[in-house]
Image: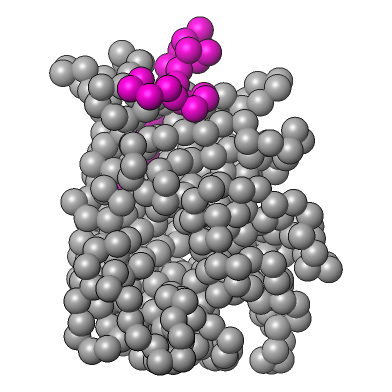
Amino acid sequence: MAQKTNESYAYYAGAYSLDEDRAIYGLGPNRDMPSLCPNCKGNPREYETRINCTQCGATGMLGVPGISASTGQRDRNQTTSSGGSSSGRGICSRTIQHPDSQVNRLCISPDKRFLAAAGHHTVKLYDIKSTNPNPLLTFEGHTGNVTGVAFHCEGKWMVTSSEDGSVKIWETRSGTIQRSYNHGSAVNDVVIHPNQGEIISCDRGGSVRVWDLAENNCSHQLIPEEDVSVSSVTVASDGSLLCAANNAGNVFVWQLIPAYERTNLLPVTHFSAHKEYITRILLSPDVKKLATCSADHTAKIWEVSNVTGTSSDESSSSSLSNVPSAGANANGINGYDKPNDDNNAPGGEPKPYTLEATLTGHQRWVWDCAFSADSAYLVTACSDHYARLWELHSQQVIRQYNGHHRGAVCVALNDYSETR
């Protein structure tokens, strides 16, 4: 496999300043900190200073993914880096100020022209190639932090998730809201199915929901583990798999089966990936790898096994396809009571994915990651202020991006080697 050249990557990053903490925590002008840290999902807050949480490093700002290789951090800036030096350090080529709030997530439009930065209540759309520091468009309508953002394959519309409990679909030309779906609980993440007809979101109440855009309703509500917040979801580029991760460090996998009326979801496996929170889960473009980022200071790469879910004649009775009844499973993990015997370990439990690599060297929480187009490289964003470009075959850091004064918490990648 060809080695990436210095010119193959560029990245945007988001950053944070101290007076932003009141925005994410909903504080008043006196900036008194709450007793619980939202980034720790409710753990008692400990103090290094009046701002920092000693458990997760939270300062009140979330980082943002950006273009090419993008990372987000807890200051008010988004930074673009490109190439690198012989010492393995990325070079910052552009900084975009985001003065209104912290930046929570970043997403690059399919045509690589625009960068969406999700912050407190709004999403701002920037021109990637322009030097104009101002956003082209601001999407207003959420009443809480925007936690997820994704573009339609042709950029015609955009979907967002928010702590206000809603998932919204926006017309990208005008910035108007086309639809809004209610979760009833703070929404942590949202992705678009490759068929462009379904969106999948997850919330702090422990649910994963599939929204059918043609029928304009929720076609599936999945509860992988009772009363455990689902932090992240990812869908395969070929539409074959759906994966979710939760705050208990567990991963859940479903096979997606296209059907005439709606997509069916069949349970494949579930396993413990980390002993701490999983902050992000992501399938590689070739659907051969699964990356998980965690509060345990690591990112892990798992081999996606060629396994299938329950047989089609059982799918109608699988509790994954609908809201499960109370007490449906003694083990509290809904939808895994009838896994395919071919996928089971000798004890009857579904086989976990094989661990390929553990990427160590991060000094704090690893918040986000992004694969290169050929699935051979991974960028991670960490609370230790660094973004790192990893060569997965060697498990080595080949580029390190710094410059932010707060932790990097999200990342997005625009791989220049990708065919357009």
Q: Is residue 61 visible?
A: no
Residue at the (72%, 76%) spot, across then down = 138
Percent of width and height locating residue 208: 48, 41
Q: Is residue 330 visible?
A: yes
Q: Nearer the viewer, residue 195 or 185?
A: 185
Percent of width and height locating residue 387: 37, 76
Where does the C terminus fall, quadrant-wise?
A: bottom right
Percent of width and height locating residue 4: 45, 69
Indicate whether 267 appears above or below 192: above
Residue at the (33%, 81%) spot, across then down = 33
Left or right: 390 in relation to 371: left
Where does the N terminus fall, quadrant-wise?
A: bottom left
Tell me how many marks there are.
0
Can you name the residue that lies furthest to the right here? 174
Indicate whether 416 appears above or below 255: below
Left or right: 101 in relation to 74: right
Q: Nearer the viewer, residue 316 or 218?
A: 218
Percent of width and height locating residue 301: 31, 51
Q: Nearer the viewer, residue 177 or 258?
A: 177
Indicate whether 237 appears above or below 104: above
Residue 74, quarter of the rendered image: bottom left
Indicate whether 164 appears above or below 31: above
Residue at the (45%, 59%) spot, across then down = 371
Can you name the residue that lies furthest to the left here? 347
Say whether residue 319 is magenta. yes
Residue 107, quarter of the rendered image: bottom right
Q: Which residues are magenta?
A: 301-328
Say whether residue 53 is magenta. no
Left or right: 369 in relation to 132: left
Residue at the (54%, 39%) spot, across then down = 209
Residue 198, quarter of the rendered image: top right
